[in-house]
């Protein structure tokens, strides 16, 4: 759905993006992470066809951002990190205008506006002026304006900044829901915890370059996908040479201490139940046995140690 | 309805604002009726004053502000992503944001027209209406184009745009008033100001004797249409669309031909006047375009590869007026062979061209510097020093011949041409070094 090849972007005195390449599949929720100044917002603006890359190509929904920028504009919704609203307009008028200006037919604009308002739970505030809304409600209105024309790609730049926990939860739910409906979502943030709930992929930028191998898929950081599962096992007592004892049982040991270990198993529930039975059968006092989920932060730290795209080995 | 027009109406022409405008207008016209009861001329004058204030000062401010406010409120990117066509966006903003000022101005213009009709001068009244509408379109569309130029420059130069539309609108008003004053220097009617073109007599344009008032009216409408085209084309660029290469040269040529037609002299002088207009357009373009190194490098690359499509997409706006200025100089050189006069001399015209190229190099050198935000000031200061200090140094070297080293001077046209050419080469050498490198650093 989104494909970038060797994207370079130069500001007058600095290179913001330096050969970034990646691909995002339809329906994915990609976390675009990296420290401040890494190039996340610049990359988003290039994907949105708002800025022209100095070199390289980007395609969105099969459209080249340089050759068909207006088609790209129609295919996506983009919420910048510092967004604005028409403070003097009511929520209803803001959304009707957003719908109309995004190409929704005049007779369908009101319905589209009401639907978007319902999705962000603003239906009870349709006649309030945008300028009267709280920070969280303004964010919801901005998102509603962004999705009112049901785009196939949604770009959200730091969408949770300044939101309270309830609003963040609502935002997470909304993003999951949109992704579930087939929308491809790209979310940038430098706060990893807020991306944890809904992102299926991650792309890390550092100094304008994609770190490591580019996009890291959920399967490589989660135990629930088809890849090998990492299981944390805790024991009720300490054992000498626990690692050796586990290996002697035919298990693959990633790490082991006196009373805990991390095992790597074949995917699937059957392998896990068999392993548990093996441990108990060997007389080991198992008190905990749970799949380990690598957090986005773990993946981030792991990726951040890898070289960037274009770096010499 | 155009959604952009409708949104602007929602914002600008709400019931409260309409009511306040009506109250202010009623107060103005009521005051005039109380002070001079039964007299038509003061009422017509008040109408013209209202029109000037609403459509020629307030209107340009709001039309430029229609873009500036979007940037300030951080809604501009949202607009740039819209599905509206550039034309819908342009006219929606231009006539939506100024709806109230047009409404207020229309009352004044209509009142003044009625007064002229009642005074038995409907023709003059009609001229005034067309002039007023043309001037308002010129200033309002020009102000919006200026705002779009500002946004575009700031983005390419990596800085926050600063808008000065009130100043720009007033300067534009002065330019229009000045132009009108020159074309219409004679008597007014019914106490109306002469700059509104309410005069009789003819203006001679390319040998044709044309009624002054109608010539002015048509000229204002024509330049207003060009301003509207400029705003539309700049809006296209904001929406990431490519513009064709012919409209800007067509405007420059139009402006040159229009001005040359007013020159009171032979073909040589007309070429000189047209050349001066082309040069003015080149200076304007040199400041108006973004200092975009990447685009300049792409143009140079396309030039090397002789890739016409890439060249036309990236060619700097300054190139067209310079080419036309070269043609004007050739015209000045050829005209005497056709029996025309030799004033100005071809050598002097060549010198002026050389100094134009030098000045454009100075502008490029400063605007492509490491701090683009200060480029305009640096360029103006550089040009001032080049002429002012150059004039002092030249005069100290030996009168007119010395001065000819630093300004196009008829007393030493050959010296001026050679000196200007050398200076242009040196300045462009340094300017090109700035444009071409060094490579940008890592962010």
Image: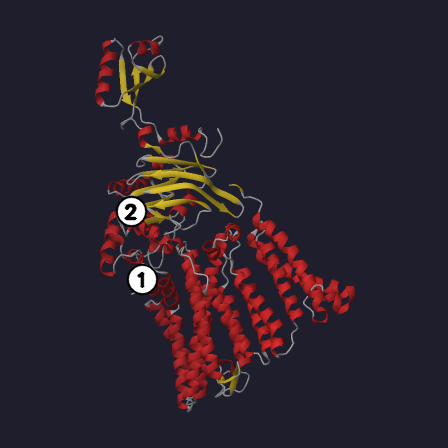
Q: x, y percentage for residue A223? A: 29, 26
Residue A305 point in image, percent of width and height: 44, 28
Q: Nearer the viewer, residue B349 or A310?
A: B349
Task: Please state the chain letter of the residue tagged with numbered disc 1 in the rendered image.
Answer: B
- As drawn, the label of residue B3 is 1
* Residue B263 image point, x, y percent: 57, 78
Task: Determine which quarter of the picture holds residue A70.
Answer: bottom left
Quadrant position of residue B332: bottom right
Identify the coloring. Answer: secondary structure
The residue at the far bottom in this view is B120
B411 vs B147: above or below:
below
Assess disc 2: are there few (<14), some (14-19) or many (≥20) residues with their C-alpha within 10 Å of its C-alpha: many
Disc 1 vs disc 2: which is toward the camera?
Answer: 2
- The image's mark for residue A152 is 2
Q: CA distance from mark 1 to mark 2?
A: 23 Å
Task: Indicate the secondary structure of the residue bearing disc 2.
Answer: loop
């Amino acid at each position: 759905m989104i494909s970038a090849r060797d994207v370079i972007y130069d500001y007058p005195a600095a290179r913001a993006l330096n050969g970034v390449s990646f691909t995002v599949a339809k329906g994915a929720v990609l976390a675009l992470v990296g420290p401040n100044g890494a190039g996340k917002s610049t990359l988003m603006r290039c994907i949105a066809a708002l800025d022209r890359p100095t070199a390289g190509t980007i395609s969105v929904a099969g459209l080249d951002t340089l050759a068909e920028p207006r088609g790209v504009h129609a295919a996506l919704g983009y919420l910048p990190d510092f967004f604005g609203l028409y403070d003097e307009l009511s929520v209803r008028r803001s959304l009707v205008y957003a719908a109309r200006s995004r190409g929704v037919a005049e007779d369908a604009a009101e319905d589209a506006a009401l639907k978007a308002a319902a999705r962000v739970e603003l239906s009870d505030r349709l006649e309030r002026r945008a300028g009267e809304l709280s920070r969280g409600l303004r964010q919801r209105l901005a998102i509603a304006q962004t999705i009112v024309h049901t785009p196939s790609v949604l770009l959200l730049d730091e969408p949770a900044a300044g939101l309270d926990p309830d609003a963040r939860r609502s935002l997470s739910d909304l993003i999951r829901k949109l992704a579930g409906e087939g929308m491809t979502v790209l979310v940038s943030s430098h706060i990893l915890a807020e991306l944890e709930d809904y992102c299926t992929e991650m792309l890390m930028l550092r100094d304008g370059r994609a770190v490591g191998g580019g996009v890291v898929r959920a399967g490589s950081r989660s135990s629930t996908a088809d890849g090998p599962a990492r299981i944390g096992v805790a024991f009720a007592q300490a054992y000498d040479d626990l690692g050796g004892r586990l290996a002697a049982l035919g298990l693959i040991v990633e790490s082991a201490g006196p009373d805990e270990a991390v095992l790597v198993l074949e995917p699937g529930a059957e392998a896990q139940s068999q392993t548990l039975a093996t441990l108990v059968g060997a007389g080991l006092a198992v008190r905990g046995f749970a799949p380990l989920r690598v957090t986005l932060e773990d993946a981030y730290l792991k990726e951040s140690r890898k070289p960037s795209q274009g770096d010499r080995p | 309805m155009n959604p952009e027009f409708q949104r602007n109406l929602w914002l600008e022409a709400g019931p409260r604002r309409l009511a306040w405008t009506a109250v202010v207008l009623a107060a103005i016209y009521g005051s005039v009726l109380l002070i001079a009861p039964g007299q038509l001329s003061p009422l017509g004058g008040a109408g013209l004053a209202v029109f000037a204030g609403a459509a020629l000062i307030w209107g340009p401010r709001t039309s430029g502000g229609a873009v500036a406010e979007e940037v300030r409120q951080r809604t501009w990117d949202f607009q740039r992503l819209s599905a509206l066509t550039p034309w819908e966006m342009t006219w929606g903003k231009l006539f939506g944001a100024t709806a109230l000022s047009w409404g207020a101005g229309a009352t004044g213009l209509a009142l003044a027209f009625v007064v002229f009709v009642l005074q038995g001068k409907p023709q003059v009244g009609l001229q005034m209406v067309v002039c007023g509408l043309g001037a308002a379109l010129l200033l309002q569309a020009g102000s919006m184009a200026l705002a779009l130029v500002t946004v575009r420059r700031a983005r390419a130069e990596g800085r926050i745009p600063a808008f000065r539309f009130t100043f720009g609108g007033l300067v534009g008003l002065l330019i229009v008033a000045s132009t009108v004053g020159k074309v219409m220097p004679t008597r007014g009617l019914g106490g109306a100001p002469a700059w509104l073109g309410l005069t009789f007599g003819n203006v001679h344009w390319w040998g044709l004797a044309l009624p002054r008032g109608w010539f002015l009216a048509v000229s204002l409408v024509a330049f207003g249409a060009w301003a509207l085209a400029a705003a539309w084309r700049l809006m296209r660029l904001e929406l990431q669309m490519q513009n064709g290469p012919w409209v800007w040269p067509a405007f420059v040529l139009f402006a040159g031909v229009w001005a040359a037609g007013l020159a009171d002299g032979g073909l040589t002088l007309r070429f000189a006047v047209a050349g001066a207009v082309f040069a003015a357009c080149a200076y304007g373009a040199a400041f108006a375009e973004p200092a975009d190194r990447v685009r300049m490098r792409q143009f140079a690359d396309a030039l090397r590869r002789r890739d016409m499509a890439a060249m036309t997409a990236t060619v700097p706006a300054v190139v067209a007026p310079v080419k036309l200025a070269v043609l004007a100089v050739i015209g000045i050189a050829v005209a005497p062979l056709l029996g025309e006069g030799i004033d100005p001399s071809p050598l002097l015209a060549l010198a002026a061209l050389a100094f134009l190229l030098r000045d454009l190099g100075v502008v490029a050198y400063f605007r492509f510097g490491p701090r683009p935000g200060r480029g305009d000031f640096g360029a103006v200061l550089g040009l001032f020093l080049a002429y002012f200090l150059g004039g002092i140094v030249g005069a100290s070297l030996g009168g007119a011949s010395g001065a000819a080293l630093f300004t196009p001077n008829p007393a030493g046209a050959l010296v001026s041409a050679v000196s200007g050419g050398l200076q242009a080469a040196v300045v462009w050498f340094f300017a090109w070094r700035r444009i071409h490198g060094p490579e940008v650093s890592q962010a």
